Image (cartoon, coloured by chain):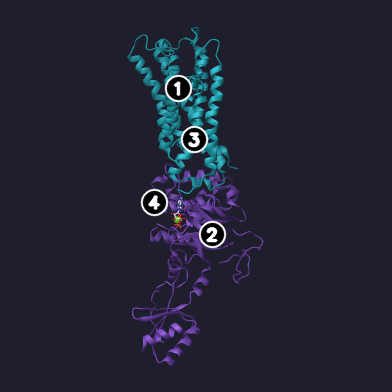
Chain colours: A purple, B cyan
Amino acid sequence: MTDGPAGRADGASATGPAAADPPPVQVRGLVKRYGELTAVAGVDLTVRTGDVYGYLGPNGAGKTTSLRMMLGLIRPTEGSVRLFGRDPMHGVRALEGVAGFVEAPTFYPYLSARRNLELLAAYDGGDAGDRIDGALQTVELSDRQRDRVGGFSHGMRQRLGIAAALLRAPRLLLLDEPATGLDPAGMRDMRLLIRRLAGQGMTVLLSSHLLNEVEDVCNRVAIVRAGRIVYEGEIAALKRGAGARYRLQTTDDDRALAVCGAQPGVSDVSVDHGRISFVADEAAVAELSQALIESGALITAMAPQTVTLEDLFFSFTEGDGVPAAAAEPRTAPEAAI
Amino acid sequence: MPGIGTVYRWELFKLRYQKRTYLGLGASVIVPILFVVAIHLHHQHGRGDFAFSDYLDRSGLAVPLVILLFGAVWLFPLITALVAGDIFASEDHNGTLKTILTRSLERWQLFVGKALAASTYAVAAILLCGTVAVVAGSIQSGFNSLQSLSGTVVSAPKALELVYVSLIVYLIPIAAIVCIGLLLSAVTRNSAAAVVGTLMVSLLIQLLGILPGLGGLAPYLLSTQFNAWQGLLRTPIDWTPIVRAIWVCALYGAPSLGAAFLVFLRRDVAGG
Ligand SMILES: Nc1ncnc2c1ncn2[C@@H]1O[C@H](COP(=O)(O)OP(=O)(O)O)[C@@H](O)[C@H]1O
Ligand SMILES: [Mg+2]
């Protein structure tokens, strides 16, 4: 949706360095085909400095494949990835200041957690080795550092994956479904950890197939479906753009239905459990109530419904890409007017 | 800065934690010991018509040479392939390629470090086997002089020197086996397939040599190069088979190594 450079003026002029600085992640026209199958079908996205960017989509949407290309693990069929302006296909220098993992992080199972980190720190060079203790503390694995990773649970490996990333003192963290497969407490800890890292100034791109998992962590999201971005932008704008859904009861629902269908500004009219449901903004609702009275269908109840991001997500990822078209909003406490 | 040396050291370190390392090194120790025990239990004259067979009871220095002779069929190719065939495939098995490829080392550095580690292991296994054979053989049959293949007598110290030079010459075809193992490891991404595949390649090449009508190929078969060391045990030393081993093995090894390198550098790391 946004094709402009990172520095474009769109009101969201939050923090950020000079516009000339290349953004942490800039992806353009990214395509990956495996034979007949197109795993990623032309993704554009820009992660700006300071973003906690949610890359959202259902399983099989192409999130992991996109992240693999960002990390230089697989070669794009078409398109480009730039990390701070550098192409990861040109070697690991592009990964300077970048760390992360795709799918479940992996380690040598026959070595201890600490040995694994020592190996990776050696492969990082510089002072990465000095960060091992701190990284283990951050992910709360200090007391298990001497144990073989082969015996670790999924959650422990996931945390060790974060620790391994932290050894690089990254400015950009790329995390593929970091909370997937964790128990509720593990998920919460992971969210807290990511928020803490973001608070320390790291730019984060994390993928997820669950919106509620990232809703309160991310400031921006891209929603990907079948390898294509169907939404990219601020979470707040996503929520605003959704419009509100209302439920309506009248003295003559058949007539009211016809009025709703004909009323400008009122969309997505349907009947659900014997009640009319539609999407409209406040001005359109005011005009609609006038029109209903004129038609003789008197309002007995009209209640706004909250549209959660989850609903939106489903509408983006399961429907035809039009927000709220397929969403069945969760019922809010009814409030008669 | 991390580099090839970093990879090399850590690959050797990782080998210390893997069963197959001890399987291979264990075989290198146990085979000569079993061989010597067998000699001890079955005292007899005229054990066969292979080189140095008559000397097994008279000089322990004949033991490593006879083991080199028979180990070429599958023992040393297998020991070599055990690690070379696993060195890339094990990363696929553990899904760790993505972990090490997203650090600060280029793929070519990882490749070279791993290839050197696999080679080091092969060298260690052969030298270990030879040394155990010398020691166990000498305990059994004495540290005595040896008769060269030309019929001249070689003093014990001189024979010991020749045994070690032979081991080094033996490393030439072993290096080619390492390269083939590395290629199959990178291509198949499966340790068992790469180990068995390397052994099969080695055996098939030997088979070519005994097929009727293909006798003319013999000097250029990889298996033949495992006998190049015998040139050292002639008086005067016959360098021809050794020189040939160098370029013939390069013909087998270099393309394999080059192909392995390209496969590893270009491959998509889509698993793990
Ligand atoms: N190595 C591969 N070979 C063939 N198809 C693949 C490969 N990796 C992923 N895919 C396919 O690409 C699509 C996207 O997969 P993926 O990127 O893993 O999705 P996500 O991470 O969003 O769940 C899926 O249909 C998957 O089956
Ligand atoms: Mg995935």
Marks 3/2 in contact by CB < 8 Å: the verdict is: no
Give the label on residue B209, or none.
1
Give the label on residue A42, or none.
2
Quarter occupied by the N terminus of chain B: top right
Residue at the image point whose x is 44% and y is 69% from the top: A315
Q: Position of residue A136 (x, y in %)?
A: 48, 51
Q: Amino acid at mark 3?
A: Leu
Q: Quarter-wise, where is residue B61 in the image?
A: top left
Q: CA distance from mark 1 to mark 3?
A: 24 Å
Which of discs 1 and 2 lies nearer the camera? The answer is: 1
Which of discs 4 and 3 lies nearer the camera? The answer is: 3
Q: Amino acid at mark 4?
A: Ser
Give the label on residue A153, or none.
4
Of the pair A329 and A1, the residue shown nearer to us: A1
Which of discs 2 and 4 lies nearer the camera? The answer is: 2
Q: Is residue A11 above or below residue B256?
A: below
Q: CA distance from mark 3 to mark 2?
A: 36 Å
Callout 4 secondary element: loop
Q: Is residue B206 visible?
A: yes
Q: Is mark 4 within 8 Å of ligand 2?
A: no
Q: Is residue B21 above or below residue A45?
A: above
Q: CA distance from mark 2 to mark 4?
A: 36 Å
Ligand 2 lies in quarter: bottom left
Callout 1 secondary element: helix
Callout 3 secondary element: helix
Which chain letter matches label 1? B
**Location of mark 3 (residue):** B182
